[in-house]
Amino acid sequence: MSSENAAVVPLHGRQTYRPDLQSIARGQLAQARAAKGLSYEDFAHLLSTMLGWPVRPDTVRAWETDSVPPGDVLVAAELIVRQTPRSLTDGEPHDALTQIVGDQFADLAGVFASRSEFQAKLSPSELLDDAREIRACGLSLNLLCQTYSEARLREIIESGTSLRCLFLKPDGRYIAEREKEEGYPAGRLSALTAMNLTILQERVYDRLSPAAQGRLEIGVYDEPIRFNVLLIDGQLCVAQPYLPDVRGVDSPTFLIRKRRVSGGLYATFDQIFSTLWERRLDQ
């Protein structure tokens, strides 16, 4: 066909396809509710919690049929779909936003401005009472030796929990350097660490049955201190960096949940502990 005889299609007369966004939004909300198996009442309650303003069941019904759900409602619905009912210590974060952050940022399940803020959210009892394996390294390990009951520590070890504790050597070079960095008088952190070692040795280990004593191992190391690390059951990690001129208790605290077979933040802190433990010194 010659160009002279070719039909000319008037593109300006064709209508551009426009998806029915209102129907898509209604369907998205309905699918979110169905995915969680929720009634209109229960879904409205969850949406109210996420949004911070009341949502009525009949409003949800209208959004799914003849009204248009607002954008923030659709975002909240998506978060609800991704939400899991377990707690942080059960292997899944307790809210959808935490889960999404954790999925995005390599095992990170929570970030807290300080250790006290972390413990207000998650107590030592919640972390340790049901643990079967606990490994800890740091400076004085106050969470184990000062915050958690020594009687309860004996109980969980007697019931089968294994515990490895690695302290910064009380009379070593690096604890003295840390005292200077934090502005403490010489010997302050050394005395605290020595006391915690004594508590663990005399008030926990020495009072255990012979069989249970084999499940408590205590060591020291004398190296630059960079992190306080608590590992629980091969799945959960609490880690704090040691920052210049900042006390350990005031440092940011990271809650880490293992999400992958290899790699990720959990594997990093697991390796930190394992390496220090292999290089531990005789007391």
Image (cartoon, rainbow, N blue to C red):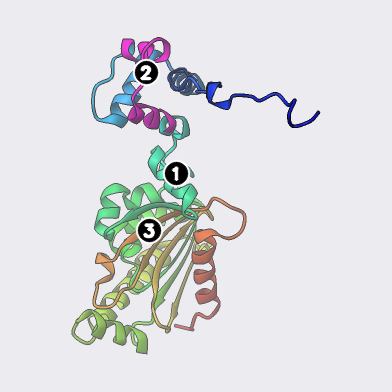
Q: Residue at x 43, y 83 (%)?
A: 223
Q: Residue at x 28, y 78 (%)?
A: 244
* Nearer to me, 150 or 143: 143
Q: Residue at x 34, y 53 (%)?
A: 124
- Cα gap from disc 1 to disc 3, whole angstroms: 16 Å
Q: Position of residue 51 (x, y in %)?
A: 29, 30
Q: Position of residue 85 (x, y in %)?
A: 43, 33
Q: Position of residue 44 (x, y in %)?
A: 33, 19
* Badge 3 element: strand
For disc 3, the marked residue is 254
Q: Position of residue 211 (x, y in %)?
A: 54, 60
Is residue 8 visible in this depiction of the protein? yes
In magenta, the rendered stretch is 58-78
> Tags 2 and 1 in contact by the CB under 8 Å rule?
no
Q: Amino acid at mark 3?
A: Phe
Q: Earlier in the sequence, mark 3 or mark 2?
A: 2
> Tags 3 and 2 in contact by the CB under 8 Å rule?
no
- Cα gap from disc 2 to disc 1, whole angstroms: 26 Å
Instruction: Please tell me how many numbered marks the rendered image carries.
Output: 3
Q: Amino acid at mark 1?
A: Ile
Magenta-colored segment: predominant secondary structure: helix
Q: On screen, 278 above or below 216?
A: below
Which quarter of the rendered picture does the N terminus lie within? top right
